[in-house]
Amino acid sequence: MQSAYKHLLRHILMQKLSLPSHPSNHFRLSLRTWLFIFSLLAMLPLLLFAIHTINRISNAQTESVLRNLQRQSKILTHSTQNELDAAFSALQMLASGAEINRTALPRLYRHAKNVVQDNPAFTAITLTDANEQLLFHSDAPLEKSNLKTNDLELTEPVFKNGRPNLSSLSGTSQNGRPVVILSAPISQGDKLAYCLRLYLGLESFDRLLANELLPSGWVAVIVDAKARVIARSLEANDFFTPNTLSDLLSASPHNDGRLSETTTLNGTVMTTLVRTLPGVNWRLAVAVPTQQMNAPRLQLLRELMLLTGMWLTLSFLLSQILATYLLRQLKRITSMVEKNSDPSVIRLRINESWQFIQTIAINQRNAQRVKDNLSDTSRQRDEVHALYEQAPCGYYSIDTEGRIIRINQTLILWLGYQLHEMLGYKSSDFLAGDGRDAFKQNFSTLLAQKKLKNQERVFIRKDGSEMPALISAEVVFDDAGQVVLIRAVVFDNTERKLAQQTLADARAREMETGRQIQLTLLSTPQLSAYAGLWLSTFSQASRGVDGDFLDVVAVGDHLLDIVAGDVMGKGVPAALMGAAIKLQFSRSKSELFGQRDTRENPPQPAEIVTAVNRAIAPQLQVLGAFATLIYLRIDTQENLSRIQV
């Protein structure tokens, strides 16, 4: 029976598998080929996953480059706009409130020279009238005037629209620097009579687009309305052709901020982003080579090819190993069948062994996890304890009788005690006398309200000195609603108290100074020389000091001028402005009295008030303040009085 069984097994192996007693090379090749195909199919999902991952990484890197392009474009746009806004602001501040006359023109000229000297990007400032007559040039003496500018195309838009204007690229300045011109109108009455122009050098824009500020290989350029280059990075000439610049200028405003493709002089394809600068007809273009954007994808494709080669190699090796193993087992079975012997079979319960190994691994991981959790818990406990003991504020806990049951090292060091000198004692024992009474009163309130915040108390240190503090406390309850303890936090209030006292002293000195200034402003001379006249004043400041002032001046033998005024605001600033206005009255009177014979033709009140207003109004506008006054002239000879408000 056993011999028949072995004969049957040999017949099956020979007929079904076509396996001779010694396997042929043809069968080995077919088996390995089949196993190689099987290995390829088995590892195909891994290859597809790798391809998908590489594609996602490539897309993410490309999107990162595009986001960086958008960000760099916005940064350069904002920087360029800020540069223009700063220049426009300087020009408008110079033009605002300017009056063109024989006395004001030198002052405006000096201001213009100072502005040019303070700003390296400004090359010059000029002033022209509506007839293109040059009134001054900041680089030339003021006396060099009566020159024709022949810049009608620059001044005409300003006089026509009445608004500041930015020119296109306007050649070079006198020192050879390329510039653009900013123009601002100046009104004379209701008419636009003058044009103030600022020559802005282009070096500042070149610095904004410098190559070292851009990623490697990137270029940037700014063009004006005539497709002329205002500023560029150092390599922009290698990338942007005149036709490309014209295309950038003719781009639709609706496409502002969108990507487009341009071609360079050497045929390189660039991904370009164009933005229009707000308020001016300038375009900013930032470009990155498209090849640079695709470089990560090409690198990943090379890595993919390497991965594919590794996949084929591993599949081939796996098929060779499996084929060798199977052929060896088949040879062994065939040999045993031909020799008519029983093969020794070792039964290995792989599932049970694998489950046992998994159980051991799981138990090891659980044990390590418990150990890590215990270590983390211990470390966190130590960190919390260190945070409590070394906190930048004091902590202590008291029971329902007010006795200290826990206190941190910070508060102990502040007060200079040892731990055993404070534990078990009432917290009120370490407070000043008033603080002890307040603690007793607030203790019941604390239990009712469950918390108190920012209570000012004074602690007594061990050496007898005082420490001002802010105390906040909160009641802790158990699950049954019974009070367990009260936690309190203490902040050292010493520096704050010192700062408050210093501020109070400074305010007192400030108010005293203001009071003395106001007494000086309201002082009046004796009127004994004018029989029948007497003068009394009364002023009540809302905050102790304000800007009220009074001045009495004799004009000749029978004229008496009285000025009373009030400055907007309160306090010392108002008093200082009042003193300045009173001083300006004295200056203006001296100037007007020095220009005529005051006995026969003294200045009229309206003239004096107008002169003071002209001198002081610009400063008051800068400060955002104003003043009201009344000017009274009494003629004791004619028994007349004139009032100017």
Image (spheres, rainbow, N blue to C red):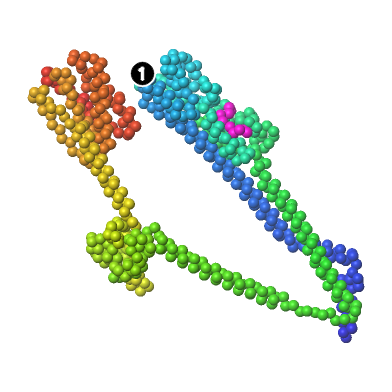
Q: Is residue 34 above or below residue 62?
A: below
User: Which residue is depicted at the point 54% across and 37% down?
Assistant: 76
> Residue at (53%, 39%) from the top-left corner?
75
Q: Nearer the viewer, residue 521 or 393?
A: 393
Tell which of 80 and 491 is nearer to you. Answer: 491
Is residue 213 found left or right of 506 in the rendered image? right
Looking at the rendered image, the quarter that the N terminus falls into is: bottom right
In reply to whether residue 228 is colored magenta, the answer given is yes
Verify whether residue 192 appears in magenta: no
Residue found at the very far left of the displayed protein:
532
Q: Residue furthest front?
A: 463
The residue nearer to you, when weighing 405 against 523, is 405
Q: Is residue 611 visible?
A: yes
Residue 158 in view in this figure: no
Give the quarter of the image for residue 465.
bottom left
Q: Position of residue 17 (x, y in %)?
A: 87, 71
Q: Up-down: is 641 above or below 568?
A: above
Which residue, given by chain and number where applicable, does mark 1 sit on?
A: 101
Q: How many marks?
A: 1
Residue depicted at x 60% and y 70%? 365
Q: Which residues are magenta?
A: 227-236
478 sits to left or right of 57: left
Residue 401, image x and y in percent?
Answer: 29, 70
What percent of the width, then of the height, locates residue 16? 87, 72
Give percent across and percent down for residue 389: 40, 63
Location of residue 318 with respect to 133 vertically, above or below: below
On the rendered structure, is 146 left or right of 614? right
Q: List the single residue furthest toward the bottom.
A: 1
Q: What element does badge 1 sit on?
A: loop
